[in-house]
Image: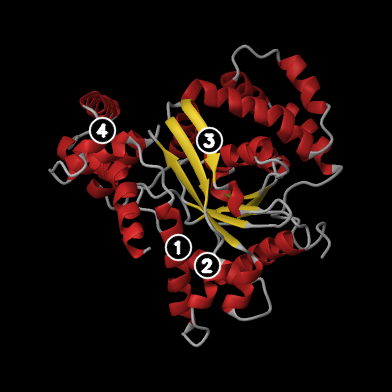
Amino acid sequence: MDYNSEFDEIRPFEGEEIPEAIKRLLKEERFKHAVIFAMPDVDYDKFSARMLSYKNTYDFQRDLVSEFLFNMAERTTSSLSISGIENVSNKKSHTYISNHRDIVLDAAFFNILLLNRGKGFDTTEVAIGDNLLIYPWIKDFVKINKSFIVQRGVSKRQMLEVSKRLSSYIHYTIKEKKRSVWIAQREGRAKDSNDRTQESLLKMLSLGGEGSFLENIRILDITPLSISYEYDPCDFLKAKEFQLKRDDAEYRKQNIDDLQNMETGLFGFKGNVRFHIGRPINPRLNTISPDMDKMAQVIALGELIDNEIHKNYHIYPGNYVAYDMLYHNTSFADRYTREEKAVFEAHLEECLNKIKIANKDVEFLTHKLLEMYANPLKNKLSAEKKG
């Protein structure tokens, strides 16, 4: 397949398209405002000249993107680390399926960690929903950064066609372009951190091949990725959204809400952040019988992925504190100090103070915040019992 034809609407920019896209970006006033907001001390003329010097994505990501993101990590994290690289090969293409904590940084941090600490690994192509492409320059920017577009707002009639094309593109990327892919396990973030792979995602991934469900999945070499944030900068926004949805069944987020979530996720404090690459799923696909009906196969595959993600969470003191507070016990009192408990309680209080809504239900909001931090531990415990 020629990348200039069937997938033009959704694929990243390639080759000579990249310098042209950079020129368009630099003409956008909103892009300039975003750069200055993110880097207040930047000399925009020098920044523009630097941007124009890049002729390919690799150099752009290795140089400018990595520098920006590592500088951001220095300001907004206590540590940024990756483990489990020994589970994958830089000679193969993998489909990384991960839990989803931050709109922008999940894939961005993962890619710079692969590129700079993975010894021979290239970055992945990244699936991004078109609902986040609020301005035209955002679409240009993400497509320079090896993102491909997931079309969300289509009719039911169009959905099968759109899903087939997306799946075909992912298969093409893995088999022909020999590039790895990153995709979140579900549309949108799990607001309560109770991470589960959507069955619709797995069905979509299987559409691009010519064999059975399991044969098509095997081609993709699905590799679970676990993302663990010590503190979620958007936790108070997620709790607020829970109450707004509880109180108004018609409540829907607006573009301004997505922008606030992106900004808060980028610049808010995250504490320690760990990425762990789990074991690829292919060696365990033989535990799923091809004689099972397709839906049963989909469910079984989802359980394999989820179990691997859950087992590999990195658990922080705050997760243990939240679990004990949520369930009104002291099961994990030996896993945190009095000082660590006080730090988490202060964070909880700070979150509640940030939430400004009518009829503020502190008890409900507290419960939701505790769930966010307790669920990774709860799921890890369950996964470890399963083995």
Residue sitting at x 53%, y 77%: 286
Discs 3, 4 touching: Cβ within 8 Å: no
Q: Secondary structure at mark 4?
A: loop
**Structural distance between the alpha carbons of marks 2 and 4:** 38 Å
In front here: 133 or 324? 324
Mark 1 residue crowding within 10 angstroms, few (<14) / some (14–19) / many (20+): some
Q: Which residue is mark 4?
A: 336
Amino acid carrying mark 3 in the image: Ser
Q: Is residue 27 visible?
A: no
Task: Determine the image quadrant of residue 372.
Answer: top left
Q: Is residue 3 found left or right of 374 in the rendered image?
A: right
Picture colour scheme: secondary structure
In front here: 18 or 222? 222
Discs 3, 2 touching: Cβ within 8 Å: no
Observer-side mark, 1 or 3, equals 3
Q: Position of residue 302 (x, y in %)?
A: 45, 66
Q: Which residue is mark 3?
A: 81
Discs 2, 1 touching: Cβ within 8 Å: yes
Q: Secondary structure at mark 3?
A: strand
Residue sitting at x 64%, y 41%: 114
Give me the disc on residue 202: 2
Q: Is residue 158 above or below residue 62?
A: below
Q: Which residue is mark 1?
A: 198
Q: Position of residue 105 (x, y in %)?
A: 54, 37
Q: Is residue 335 found left or right of 222 in the rendered image?
A: left
Discs 1, 3 touching: Cβ within 8 Å: no
Give me the disc on residue 110: none
